[in-house]
């Protein structure tokens, strides 16, 4: 039954990805640009879902990991002129280091306390960026000389490919024995430990994987935008969007998080004519989903599937 | 110094309500900043648009905060707590997400109707006095006095009245309270009412003191959250101490070093305390 279902899910995703891959042939560059950002956001949300949905760690600071990756890559490129690809790799590595730093308190404190630590991490990073404005561009942002490509289609394909590969890896990981152990240690660490699993090792691994994908995605996003600023990759509001997407799409589903992110960004764009009310409407919809379909989009769809 | 005291007292007032809610019903209300800003903006609108006078304006501000707090409880927190579809161990994160979204909604509504310009509520007490050669607005002293009075009243309410004792008992053992024949929901409503009034007073005073805009929602929630964690979640006296520590640390840094570094020492202290003593200064766990 479960293999049948997963193959069906796989089939649907495959069709969606193939459909999405043909988009550059008949939609405008504007739509492609929007979806490119949405796809990178999807990776942020999936990486967050791995930590929250599986490891049970409420990370209020997804933008800490994203920002470290994005700014490392950006600074190395803008100040030292290193090549784009080297910068992306180094950005992702810096993020992994940041993930390890963030994981240290997580192994000591739990629940709201850990949530606060991550929030503080974001605020510190934000202060740091503003204070060392010479290096980081401060509040105005950092202009990055190189971009991956100026062609909207190419950028779109890179983003789509990156999201698909990340989704496959993260989803595969969440369904593997490692994912199950993570889920168990998130729900009842004592019992999971008593069953002989090394919780510390598994959680650290979850942090590293989550940080790696967040940082990589952040670095790619910076080279897509051609600029790195606090408002786009570090601000708490960005982190809130990531969290909302993951909860909206369905926690503990990984793929749902990507759907939620795409929905959030596209919906925000559709509501642009309503002006300042756009954010209000998006949060109201998200709140209703949280209240009435706590499983999120994909969670609701899956449970209906399971019932029939 | 008086500046620091007034800021600390304001922080303390804001954080006390926050910690009370957590201590009694285990809810971390992330729409806290939004409620405070709503109170300040309502007071500003009533006083300068409708011309009802500063006192009535301040009262309206507190009333709005009370209503918003009730709306938060009935529209967001209670449905999540009563939901059968959300597993118990995940309710905490749902309340967090729900109140966060709710806070953003309030913030956006304020920005839509009142624009996001900073608003300064007209001070109740005007004029300045010289204290030890420093010109101090009288309103600052007034703020500090009001904050202390309200906190003292709260202490009396919690420790000396029947309702207060029920609230205290509920924070220790909710099931025991229901066994004694007290309706838990009623206690929660009382706590949210106290919280609304506290947040409202803090919001209005903040509006007079520093001025608020819809942008201050996030930082206000964050500062209340960090003060409460620093002092120990659920411990009222802990958050009082923490509020003064943070308030003075911020003011001193702003005066002695540079306003740009204002929040950094407090954040460092917070990280430090979390490593040494994760349960906060006076935390129970």
Image: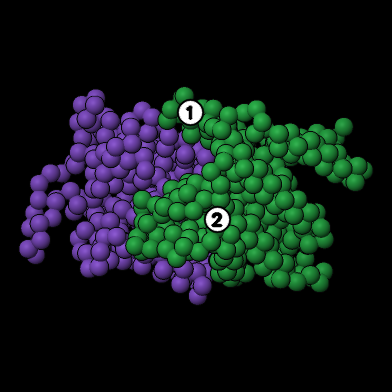
Chain colours: A green, B purple
Q: Residue at x 21, y 35 (%)?
A: B54
Q: Which residue is mark 2?
A: A219
Q: Residue at x 18, y 41 (%)?
A: B124
Q: Residue at x 54, y 58 (%)?
A: A84
Q: Is residue A303 left or right of residue B227?
A: right
Q: Residue at x 41, y 41 (%)?
A: B34
Q: Is residue B7 above or below residue A157?
A: below
Query: Is residue B208 at least partly visible in the picture?
Result: yes
**Distance from label 2 to label 1 (Cα)?**
27 Å
- x and y percent of residue B279 in the render? 52, 67
Query: Is residue B168 at least partly visible in the picture?
Result: no
Circle 2: element type:
helix
Check the picture and name the quadrant holding the C terminus of chain B.
bottom right
Q: Please name whichever residue, A102 or B149, is drawn nearer the observer in this view of the structure.
A: A102
Q: Please name whichever residue, B165 or A89, is drawn nearer the observer in this view of the structure.
A: A89
Q: Which residue is mark 1?
A: A272
- x and y percent of residue B136 in the render? 13, 55
Mark sitting earlier along the chain (2/1): 2
Q: Is residue A9 above or below residue A186?
A: above
Q: Is residue A226 left or right of residue A255?
A: left
């Amino acid at each position: 039954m479960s293999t049948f279902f997963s193959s069906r899910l796989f089939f649907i995703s495959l069709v969606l990805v193939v459909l999405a891959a043909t988009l550059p042939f008949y939609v405008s560059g504007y739509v492609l640009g929007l979806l490119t950002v949405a796809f990178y956001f999807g990776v942020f949300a999936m990486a967050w879902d791995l930590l929250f949905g599986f490891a049970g760690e409420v990370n209020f600071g997804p933008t800490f990991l994203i920002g470290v990756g994005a700014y490392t890559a950006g600074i190395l490129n803008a100040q030292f002129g290193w090549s784009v690809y080297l910068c992306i790799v180094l950005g992702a590595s810096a993020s992994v280091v940041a993930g390890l730093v963030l994981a240290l308190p997580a192994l000591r404190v739990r629940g709201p306390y850990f949530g606060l630590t991550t929030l503080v991490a974001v605020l510190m990073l934000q202060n740091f960026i503003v204070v060392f404005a010479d290096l980081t561009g401060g509040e105005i942002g950092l202009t990055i000389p190189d971009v991956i490509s100026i062609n909207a289609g190419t950028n779109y394909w890179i983003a789509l490919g990156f999201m698909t590969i990340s989704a496959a890896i993260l989803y595969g990981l969440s369904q593997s024995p490692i994912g199950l152990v993570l889920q168990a240690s998130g729900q009842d660490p004592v019992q999971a430990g008593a069953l002989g699993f090394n919780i510390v090792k598994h959680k650290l691994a979850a942090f590293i994987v989550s940080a790696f994908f967040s940082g990589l995605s952040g670095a790619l996003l910076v080279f897509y935008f051609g600029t790195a600023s606090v408002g786009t990759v570090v601000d708490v509001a960005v982190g809130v969007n990531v969290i909302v997407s993951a909860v909206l799409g369905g926690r503990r589903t990984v793929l749902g998080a990507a759907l939620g992110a795409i929905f959030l960004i596209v919906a925000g764009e559709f509501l642009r004519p309503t002006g300042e009310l756009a954010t209000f409407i998006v949060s109201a919809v998200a709140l209703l989903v949280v209240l009435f379909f706590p499983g999120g989009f994909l969670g609701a769809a899956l449970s209906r599937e399971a019932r029939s | 110094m008086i500046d620091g005291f007034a800021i600390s007292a304001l922080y303390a007032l804001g954080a006390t309500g926050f910690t009370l809610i957590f201590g009694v019903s285990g809810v971390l209300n992330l729409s806290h900043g939004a409620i405070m800003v709503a109170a300040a903006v309502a007071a500003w609108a009533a006083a300068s648009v409708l011309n009802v006078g500063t006192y009535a304006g301040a009262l309206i501000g507190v009333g709005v905060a009370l209503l918003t707090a009730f709306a938060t409880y009935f529209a967001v927190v209670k449905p999540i707590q009563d939901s059968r579809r959300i597993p118990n161990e995940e309710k905490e994160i749902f309340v967090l997400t729900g109140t966060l979204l709710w806070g953003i909604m309030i913030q956006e509504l304020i920005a839509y109707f009142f624009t996001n310009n900073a608003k300064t509520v007209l001070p109740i007490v005007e004029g300045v006095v010289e204290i030890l050669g420093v010109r101090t607005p009288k309103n600052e002293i007034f703020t500090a006095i009001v904050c202390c009075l309200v906190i003292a009243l709260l202490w009396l309410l919690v420790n000396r009245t029947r309702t207060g004792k029920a609230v205290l008992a509920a924070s220790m053992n909710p099931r025991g309270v229901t066994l004694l024949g007290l309706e838990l929901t009623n206690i929660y409503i009382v706590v949210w009412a106290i919280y609304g009034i506290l947040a409202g007073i803090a919001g209005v005073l903040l509006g007079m003191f520093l001025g608020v805009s819809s942008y201050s929602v996030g930082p206000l929630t964050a500062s209340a959250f960090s003060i409460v964690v620093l002092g120990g979640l659920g411990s009222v006296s802990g958050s009082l101490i923490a509020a003064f520590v943070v308030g003075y640390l911020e003011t001193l840094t702003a005066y002695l070093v540079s306003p740009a570094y204002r929040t950094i020492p407090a954040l460092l202290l917070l990280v430090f305390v979390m490593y040494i003593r994760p349960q906060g200064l006076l935390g129970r766990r």
